[in-house]
Structures are given as structure tokens and as C-alpha cells.
Image (cartoon, rainbow, N blue to C red):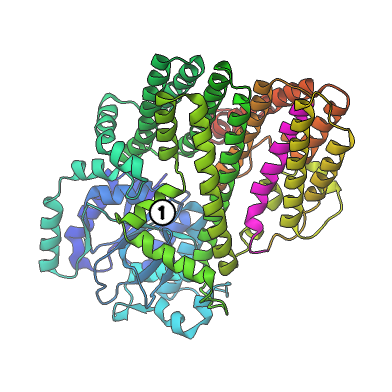
């Protein structure tokens, strides 16, 4: 149950208080209370069991602004941030990557909007902050936050905007000082202002009335910053599909499933070949991508967010893309090119490794934003200069350099557009080659720049998570001796797998067999990489470890399949199942969710590699790939059902455990 609390310390603000209470109800709050002071607010928070919405009585805003705050999917605790100049008593904030990283900052990027949503896990901190602000609790115990110990910023926790902070502002300042992760909710197209007198109230109400709320919400359903192709060739008309879907009652999940069907149909047509089929497949692929954008727009327009929907969208995007690769690979092979499936495998492996680096580089940036800024000795070095240049380009929205930066990294819109155009005009082979060439160049570009910037940031992001889980090590890795330098070991493992694959390709092409000692040596290098499982991942580049391990496992599996002369489609299918398993892990990392319920049953990449090597040596590589792939697929499906159906039902009391 969601509780909304309007803090009305000033009895004269009765009209605004009642209106805010009514707006919170329309915004989805199950219960709305009006607190006369911070002590009463602390008592209400202490008794709450779900998210709590808190606002002062000086906020004039569209109801949609409050609804967006109440339903924001970015994180459990979210603060409204405005661009208005701060008035006396209002807290200024500095945000980076959507997070409030400092309250009362001298280089503030906005002002606290007088409203916040606090997740259930942060409610004890909110209650303590309220009691402290009311003078009913001692100072909190020290926490590892430089803002509490730095005199230059500690004073800002109590003052901003030219005077002592107001009650609600003291709450958000105290939460930030305690190290609570607070995300920022910006107001765009709609209106929200904090008012201090009758004239300001009247002006704010007039500004609210002048905006068509529904029209603004429809525009807000489109991402503020998207890629070039999506911005100019999809979002210009996809909002009309979004509006129609909302009117007839189709949910985001339904749109996602239709998008999957379109992509599968496009893959079938690409595989069938022939100009009419290729053109039709290109059209379906484009429409499928439009629907892929619509599902997110529909979720934002209707405010129907869920952990399941976010997970499904991530998994569906990758499944659709790789099914299309399979269709292109089959089509190229059917057209007479011997290595069509090999190109499809290469594209899938490259794209998955790229996505792993994208995910962990994003986590690295998020972690860096939460940490106090430290001026290092090489602040003027190449990493610092690249960081400053990137920030300038990102701020120059709409410029040529901005669009070049967003396009050169080969985002999904550009990938799907390239596939559709190349397949329709030339054929599947050219489409796959184009994806591989651009993807490789983009990987080299982003990898090089990110490595330099990461060395400059020096943030050990892998040390902040369950490294063994996201490495996907499994039980076998925990039985091996511990070795240091996990990144170096992972790179050696990947190089060994790559060398084995090259050797296997040459041997098979020449009509011979791969010597037994070659995969055994590669396996030894892989197990050496597994020894880094329990080592400290505190290096500035250790965020690359998961991507290196994915490359090592995929390349080794492909080498086993090639050496064992397994059908190309079987090798592709096995690696596809692996990618689903690993995308499940990254999706949970991005959504801050726990491990899949059956994660231990996936064995871990070292054990899977050992089983495949045994299968090859025994002469049953195809059987090993098929059996292990089918097993992992069953585990994946069962884990999905448990995570998203059975366990939530039990939590709601819908399913009772035996006994």
C-alpha cells in the first residue's frame, strides 16, 4: 500500500494542503494523511509498510507530475527536481546520471521540488531523518560519506537557498547525507512550482491551467534523448500508435509480444530468400522495431511499470535481434555461402560481449556518480580530457557532433535499419557482413575510449556487487585455488578459446581433426580464469571481466562444435541459450534485482566448458551441445516461471507452501 503524506506545518496553507491531498489520491496513493509536523510524519512513516510519498504544502503542480513521481521506475527513492531558482529555505541539488549526488551543492543543477517518494527499504532512514529534523533524535551515526565530514559541504545539509531549510527540504538533505540512493525526477513539458505567497500561487496555477496535460503526457512518452534513427524515423509517428493502443486497452506486454512475432516473421522471410520475401522481411523488421519503441512509450504514457515488464522488454530485444541473425545466417547459407551460420554466430557473440561492456560501463558510471569527486594527479590527462569532451558533446543536444557520437556506437535502431536496408536491397550475406564490420568498429571505438576514461575514474565497480554471481562462476570455480589479477586471467582464457577456434576451423577446413591437447590446453586457461572468482575485483578495469568471460565461454563452445563437426544451427542454438542466461543476469543488475532462483542449477561457465570438452574428447560433441543446451533452456524457463509467477504469487498469499 502506498501512503502519501502532506506536511502542512503552516495552518494558513489549508487550501493548497487539501488540493495536494486530492491530487495524491488521483496520482494513485492508497492512503493520504496530513501531518502537522515532522514528529507526526515520523510516526506515520514508522508504521508504513510500503512506499511513502511526502510533499510540503507549497507545491503547485499538474497531477501528472505527482503521478510520474509516484510511479517512477528508475528506483525506489526518487526526489522531484525543478529548474526554478532556489528561494530561501529550499534545498539545491546536484545530480549526475539521474541520481541526486549532493544536496546544498555550490554547483547545483536544480532545486528540490518539495516532493519525494521513499522506497520501503529507506523508510527507517526517513523516519530517523524526520525525528532528527524535529529535534527528537540524536545525530545519526557516522556513515562513509565525505559530505558529512567535509566542512564545506556539511553546512549545506542544513542550509540552502539563502537560509535554514524548510521541513521537507531538511528531510531530503538528511537522507542524502546518510548515503541514501536518491534518483532525480525532472519535470518536462508539465508544470511544477513551489510557491511562497498568493501571487506566486496564482501564477503557478495559471501556468498549470495553460498546459494540455494529456497532450504533454503523450509527448513525454517519447524518450527525451534517443538515437538518430529512432528520433527521426520512429518517434515522429509512433506516438499515434501509442495513443491508439492505450485507447483500446492493449498493455505494454502485449505490444512486446506482437513485436517479437514481427521479428520472428522477418527472420523466417530472410531465411526464405528471394527479393519479395527479403523486402517483406525488412518491412516487418522495421515495424517490429516501431512496436519495440511503442511498448516503452505505452508504459510511460499509461504509467504501467513493472519489474516483469522491464525484464521482458530487455530479454525480448535480445531474442528478437538474435533470431533475425539466425534468419540471415540460414538465408546466406541457403543462397550458397558456406559460412552463413558462422557470420550469424560471430554477430551474436560480438553483440553480446558489447552489451556486457555497455552494462558494466553504465554501472561504473553510476557508481562513480555516487562517490565524492576526488581530483587525481592525472586529472588533466587523456582520460580526464575525454570525460570533459564527452560531457560537452552530450550537453550539445541536436548538434552534428552529438548525433555522430550517438550513431557511431551502432545502437539498436541503427542496427535494425542497416539490417533491413541491406537485406532488402542486396541480401542476407551483405546484411550480416555490414553488421559485423560496423559492430567491430563501434566496439573498438567505445572500448578504447571507455578504457581510458575508466582508468581516469578509478572506480572498482565489481567490488560493489556479488562478483561471483555476475561472473557466472558456479560451484567448480569455488573449489579452485584463488589467483589474483582476474582481468588478466579472463583475457588469457578468451585468447586461448579464440586460438582453439581458429585451429579448429583450419583443421576442419583441411579435412583433419583438432589435436586433443589443443582443447585441453584451452580448458586449462579457462580454469585459470575461473581461479579469479574469489579474488578482489578492485581494479579500475575489472568491469571488463564479465565481458571477457562471456567471450571465452562462447568462443570455446563454438570451437568445440566446430572441432566435433556439430551442425552450425546447433552451435548457434547453444550459444543463444547461453546469451539468454547471461542477459537475465545483466537485466537483474540493471533493475537491481536478486539472482535468478535456479541460478545454481546453471552449473557455471567453467563446469559447462568442462562438460563440452569431455563430450568432444569422447567423440560426442553434438550430443553434448544438444543435451547441455536443452538442459540450460529448461532451467531458464523454469527459473522465469518461478521468479515471475510462483514466488510473487506466494508472496501475495496466492500460493501456500506445502505443510
The answer to which image quadrant residue 85 occupies is bottom left
SS type, badge 1: helix
Q: Is residue 619 left or right of residue 167?
A: right
Residue 42 locus on image (x, y percent)? 43, 63
Q: Main secondary structure of the magenta part?
A: helix
Q: Please tell me which residue is depicted at 50% across the width and 71% down the height of the picture.
A: 384
The reply to whether the magenta stretch includes residue 107 is: no
Near-viewer residue (443 or 606): 443
Q: Please tell me which residue is depicted at 10% across the width and 56% down the height of the picture.
A: 206
Vertical side of 267 occupied by 642: above or below: below
Residue 313 locus on image (x, y percent)? 46, 35
The answer to which image quadrant residue 215 occupies is top left
Near-viewer residue (587 or 269): 269
Vertical side of 200 occupied by 297: above or below: above
User: What's the magenta region?
Assistant: 539-563
The residue tagged 1 is: 405
**The N terminus sits in image quarter:** top left
Q: Please tell me which residue is depicted at 27% across the width and 30% down the height of the picture.
A: 241
The answer to which image quadrant residue 402 occupies is bottom left
Residue 223 locus on image (x, y percent)? 33, 46
Q: In the displayed image of the protein, which residue is found farthest to the front?
A: 510
Near-viewer residue (304 or 454): 454
**The C terminus sits in image quarter:** top right
Q: Is residue 223 left or right of residue 575?
A: left
Task: Please say whether residue 466 is visible from this viewpoint.
Answer: no
Amino acid at each position: 500500500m502506498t501512503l502519501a503524506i502532506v506536511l502542512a506545518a503552516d495552518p494558513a496553507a489549508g487550501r493548497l494542503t487539501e488540493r495536494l491531498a486530492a491530487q495524491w489520491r488521483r496520482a494513485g496513493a492508497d492512503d493520504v494523511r496530513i501531518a502537522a509536523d515532522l514528529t507526526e510524519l515520523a510516526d506515520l512513516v514508522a508504521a508504513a509498510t510500503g512506499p511513502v510519498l511526502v510533499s510540503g504544502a507549497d507545491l503547485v503542480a499538474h497531477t501528472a507530475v505527482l503521478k510520474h513521481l509516484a510511479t517512477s521506475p528508475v528506483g525506489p527513492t526518487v526526489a522531484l527536481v525543478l529548474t526554478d531558482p532556489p528561494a530561501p529555505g529550499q534545498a539545491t541539488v546536484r545530480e549526475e546520471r539521474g541520481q541526486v549526488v549532493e544536496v546544498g551543492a555550490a554547483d547545483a543543477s536544480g532545486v528540490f521540488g518539495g516532493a519525494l517518494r521513499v522506497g520501503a527499504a529507506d523508510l527507517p532512514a526517513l523516519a530517523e531523518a524526520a525525528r532528527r529534523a524535529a529535534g527528537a533524535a540524536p545525530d545519526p551515526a557516522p556513515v562513509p560519506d565525505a559530505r558529512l565530514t567535509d566542512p564545506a559541504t556539511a553546512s549545506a545539509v542544513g542550509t540552502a537557498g539563502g537560509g535554514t531549510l524548510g521541513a521537507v527540504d531538511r528531510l531530503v538533505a538528511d537522507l542524502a547525507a546518510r548515503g541514501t540512493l536518491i534518483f532525480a525526477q525532472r519535470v518536462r513539458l508539465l508544470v511544477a512550482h513551489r510557491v511562497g505567497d498568493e501571487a506566486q500561487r496564482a501564477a503557478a496555477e495559471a501556468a498549470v491551467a495553460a498546459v494540455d496535460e494529456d497532450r504533454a503526457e503523450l509527448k513525454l512518452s517519447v524518450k527525451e534523448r534517443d538515437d538518430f534513427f529512432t528520433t527521426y524515423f520512429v518517434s515522429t509517428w509512433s506516438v499515434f500508435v501509442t495513443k491508439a493502443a492505450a485507447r483500446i486497452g492493449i498493455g505494454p506486454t502485449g505490444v512486446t509480444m506482437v513485436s517479437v512475432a514481427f521479428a520472428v516473421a522477418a527472420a523466417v522471410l530472410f531465411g526464405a530468400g528471394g527479393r519479395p520475401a527479403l523486402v517483406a522481411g525488412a518491412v516487418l523488421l522495421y515495424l517490429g522495431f516501431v512496436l519495440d519503441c511503442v511498448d516503452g512509450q505505452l508504459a510511460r504514457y499509461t504509467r504501467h511499470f513493472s519489474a516483469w515488464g522491464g525484464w521482458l522488454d530487455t530479454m525480448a530485444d535480445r531474442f528478437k535481434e538474435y533470431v533475425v541473425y539466425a534468419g540471415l545466417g540460414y538465408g546466406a547459407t541457403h543462397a550458397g555461402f558456406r559460412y552463413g551460420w558462422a557470420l550469424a554466430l560471430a554477430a551474436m557473440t560480438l553483440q553480446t560481449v558489447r552489451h556486457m561492456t555497455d552494462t558494466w560501463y553504465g554501472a561504473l558510471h553510476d557508481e562513480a556518480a555516487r562517490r565524492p569527486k576526488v581530483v587525481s594527479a592525472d586529472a588533466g590527462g587523456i582520460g580526464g580530457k575525454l570525460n570533459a569532451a564527452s560531457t560537452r558533446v552530450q550537453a550539445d543536444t541536436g548538434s552534428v557532433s552529438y548525433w555522430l557520437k550517438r550513431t557511431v556506437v551502432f545502437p539498436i535502431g541503427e542496427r535494425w535499419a542497416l539490417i533491413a536496408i541491406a537485406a532488402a536491397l542486396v541480401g542476407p550475406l551483405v546484411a550480416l557482413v555490414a553488421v559485423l564490420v560496423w559492430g567491430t568498429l563501434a566496439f573498438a571505438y567505445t572500448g578504447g575510449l571507455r578504457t581510458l576514461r575508466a582508468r581516469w575514474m578509478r572506480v572498482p565497480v565489481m567490488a560493489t556487487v556479488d562478483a561471483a554471481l555476475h561472473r557466472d562462476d558456479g560451484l567448480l570455480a569455488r573449489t579452485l585455488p584463488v589467483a589474483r589479477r582476474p582481468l588478466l586471467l579472463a583475457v588469457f582464457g578468451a585468447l586461448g578459446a579464440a586460438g582453439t577456434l581458429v585451429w579448429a576451423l583450419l583443421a576442419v577446413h583441411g579435412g583433419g581433426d583438432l589435436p586433443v591437447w589443443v582443447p585441453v590446453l584451452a580448458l586449462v586457461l579457462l580454469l585459470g580464469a575461473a581461479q579469479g572468482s574469489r579474488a578482489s575485483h578492485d581494479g579500475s578495469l575489472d568491469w571488463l571481466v564479465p565481458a571477457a568471460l562471456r567471450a571465452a565461454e562462447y568462443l570455446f563452445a563454438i570451437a568445440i562444435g566446430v572441432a566435433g563437426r556439430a551442425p552450425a544451427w546447433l552451435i548457434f542454438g547453444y550459444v543463444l541459450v547461453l546469451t539468454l542466461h547471461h542477459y537475465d543476469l545483466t537485466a537483474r543488475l540493471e533493475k537491481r534485482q536478486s539472482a535468478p532462483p535456479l541460478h545454481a542449477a546453471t552449473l557455471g561457465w567453467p563446469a559447462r566448458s568442462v562438460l563440452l570438452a569431455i563430450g568432444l574428447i569422447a567423440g560426442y560433441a553434438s550430443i553434448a551441445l544438444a543435451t547441455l543446451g536443452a538442459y540450460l533452456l529448461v532451467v531458464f524457463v523454469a527459473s522465469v516461471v518461478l521468479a515471475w509467477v510462483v514466488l510473487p504469487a506466494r508472496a501475495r498469499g496466492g500460493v501456500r507452501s506445502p505443510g
